[in-house]
Image (cartoon, coloured by chain):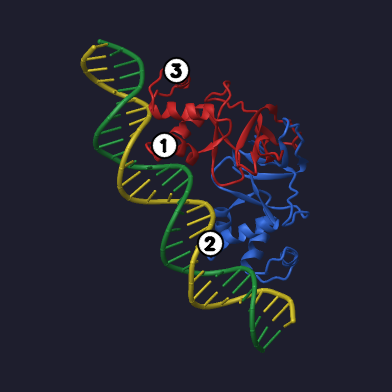
Chain colours: A red, B blue, C green, D yellow
Amino acid sequence: MSTAPDRYVQLLAQHSLRNTAMRRAVLELLSRTPFALSSHDIEQELGPGVDRITLYRTLKSFEEKGLIHRVPENSDVSKYAACSIECSQHAHFDNHVHFKCTNCQHVYCLNQVSIPVVTLPAKFEAITRDYLLAGVCRECQPA
Amino acid sequence: MSTAPDRYVQLLAQHSLRNTAMRRAVLELLSRTPFALSSHDIEQELGPGVDRITLYRTLKSFEEKGLIHRVPENSDVSKYAACSIECSQHAHFDNHVHFKCTNCQHVYCLNQVSIPVVTLPAKFEAITRDYLLAGVCRECQPA
DNA sequence: ACGTAAATGCATCAATGTTTCAAATACAGA
DNA sequence: TCTGTATTTGAAACATTGATGCATTTACGT
């Protein structure tokens, strides 16, 4: 794990998180990957040196502080993706649709597609919304 | 577990599932509960007599045959709810919105609110859609 | 009522995640 | 730059959720 002092260091500081090798590595990986990754995926990508427990804690604190968000999935494993810049500990603003490919299993954040609003029955008040699509992604379309 | 020959027996037969005590009990419980239940919840409700493994298998086959659906959640535990009548092994038609109360933790199927359609980027083709809201439910509103 | 395929119950195994605690480390302040 | 302290890490143990293999039991078509 390199020690390059770059924008990830700033991101961590902005969210009151100490600058450690594991955090930089996870942040860098999630930022450069165009689809959501599970804890297991991240472990694989970062190589055999990473501690599984530390990784769980890293993901948990990142989620709490608003650096990453958990993509809603109807499977058993949680997948994570980098948040948009506006997110913080106090509020998540990931109002985009998620798309899961049933072929390659990748989960994409479709940042350009925002979640439509619905009218709820009386006395139900929504605070957050998640919209998850499943189907065939760009990469897996038959030519 | 009673042996009352009622509409659950028919439901099971219609979906090619044998009529057993556990299946009748789970089906009855999910049908009368207005929010989604986790495997653990169901175990508690049905009492100490139920076998955990059999329950997992029951939920799995119910989901496969289209009797119940798994409610998308961004937590770790899976929750299940009874499907609408039109669902079958071949296709689920649960095009309603789900609502999770951040206070009582209950997940409601808002059957009267259908999921709005979105326009996807080129070459993405959606097959299923899930819409999950979180907020304060009817029961938990301050007076 | 009988035979067979399916479902159950139990032991075992696997994956995911949490907790506890000592050792190491980041970072603020002198 | 050095030092103190609060945070983070790493390791072992534990908890929960779920799957698998197999013998026994049960549902249901004939």
Q: Secondary structure at mark 2?
A: helix
Mark on residue B106? none
Q: Which residue is mark 1?
A: A47
The front one of A58 and A118 is A58
Q: Position of B67 compared to D18: left or right?
A: right
The front one of A143 and B45 is A143
Q: Which residue is mark 3?
A: A6
- Residue A79 seen in render: yes
Task: Specify the amino acid type for callout 3.
Answer: Asp
Judging from the image, mark 1 belongs to the subunit labelled: A
Q: Which quadrant would residue B55 be assigned to in this image?
A: bottom right
Q: Are marks 1 and 2 on the same chain?
A: no
Query: Do tag 2 and tag 3 residues touch (Cβ < 8 Å)?
Result: no
Mark 3: give few (<14), some (14-19) or many (20+) Cα within 10 Å: few
Residue visible at 58% across and 24% down? A84
Mark 2: give few (<14), some (14-19) or many (20+) Cα within 10 Å: few
Residue A109 % position (x, y): 62, 31
The front one of B20 and B104 is B20
Judging from the image, mark 2 belongs to the subunit labelled: B
Q: Secondary structure at mark 1?
A: loop
Q: Which residue is mark 2?
A: B53
Q: Earlier in the sequence, mark 3 or mark 1?
A: 3
Residue visible at 74% across and 43% down? B96
Q: Secondary structure at mark 3?
A: loop
